[in-house]
Amino acid sequence: MQLVGYEPSGTGSALQVSDGDGATIVRHPLGSGETLSYSLADRHCAGTIDDGEHIPCDRPTAPYCDYHTSTWVCARCTGTCLKDEMDCYEPHAVYIAAFAPDTFKVGVTREWRLQTRLREQGADRAAHVHTVSNGRIARELEAEIATRLVDRVRTGPKIAALAADVDEDAWASLRSEFDVIDRFDFDYGIDLETRPVRETIASGTIVGVKGRLLVLETAGTTYAVDMRDLVGYDLEEGTAERALQSSLGSFE
């Protein structure tokens, strides 16, 4: 059985596993309070999913080999279309998002998908600041705002945000620079007093999911797992036997 994908918060919060060639993808929902009991074996390319069925690949590169790596060119667009023909002719939203305590980013998504996209990223706060007719205009606005805000947030700051509060004064100050169309305040049901330990595991009691971060508790320590780091691993039933880093709180 191989872990071949994941669904972040906002789109189901689940791990996707496959039993082999042509197998139907099975969703493992990540409900708070549920238990995961898998150990990680070998890791190799996760292959591809075609119409709900898994096509495996045994090449050693993970999570994907060169044959199964795809690049979404729209993510690199700054207003000049990188495709043979521009095809994003639908309303797009430009947003700013806050990740506790004070990391602020700008982003773009199709307007109808705005709240889903924000939850997928694990944003704590957000504001919809522009609605435009197509993706090209949205990317131009994003590139302009990105001269003073980041346009991506790495895993480290997102893990730190799990045990922090948003600097509301700084967030309010940033919002005041825009004509805000709508505001969002997200709660992922994760209440931590200390920053979790970053690990790559698939066992423990599920605390919750925030973006693509899976928060697990085991043996008195809380761990944050970037689900992308799990993609490609073969799974075996049973908890991990290797030694894990523990938080100081687990010794109290």
Image (cartoon, helix red, strand yellow):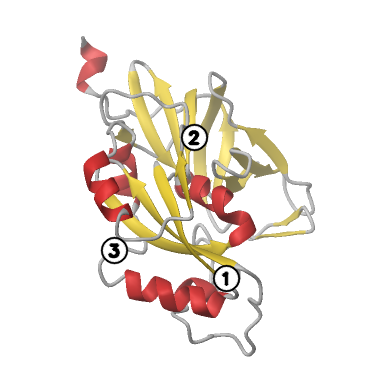
Question: Is residue 4 placed above or below 151 in the rendered structure?
Answer: above
Q: Nearer the viewer, mark 1 or mark 2?
A: 2
Mark 2, Cα crowd under 10 Å, few <14 / some 14-19 / many 20+, is many
Q: Which residue is mark 2?
A: 209
Inspect the image, locate mark 2, and give the three-letter code of the amino acid beneath it: Val
Circle 1 — which element?
loop
Inspect the image, locate mark 1, and give the three-letter code of the amino acid beneath it: Ser
Q: For the N terminus, which image quadrant?
A: top right
Q: Earlier in the sequence, mark 1 or mark 2?
A: 1
Inspect the image, locate mark 3, and give the three-letter code of the amino acid beneath it: Leu
Query: Disc number at residue 149?
Result: 3
- Percent position (x, y) of residue 160? 28, 39
Q: Could you tell me if the residues under marks 2 and 3 are in contact, i.e. CB atoms within 8 Å?
A: no
Q: CA distance from mark 2 to mark 3?
A: 25 Å
- How many numbered marks, from 0 up? 3
Question: Is residue 217 placed above or below 22 in the rendered structure?
Answer: above
Question: Is residue 98 placed above or below 40 in the rendered structure?
Answer: below
- Percent position (x, y) of residue 40? 50, 38
Q: Earlier in the sequence, mark 1 or mark 3?
A: 1
Q: CA distance from mark 1 to mark 2?
A: 25 Å
Q: From this viewpoint, which residue is outermost toward the bottom?
A: 84
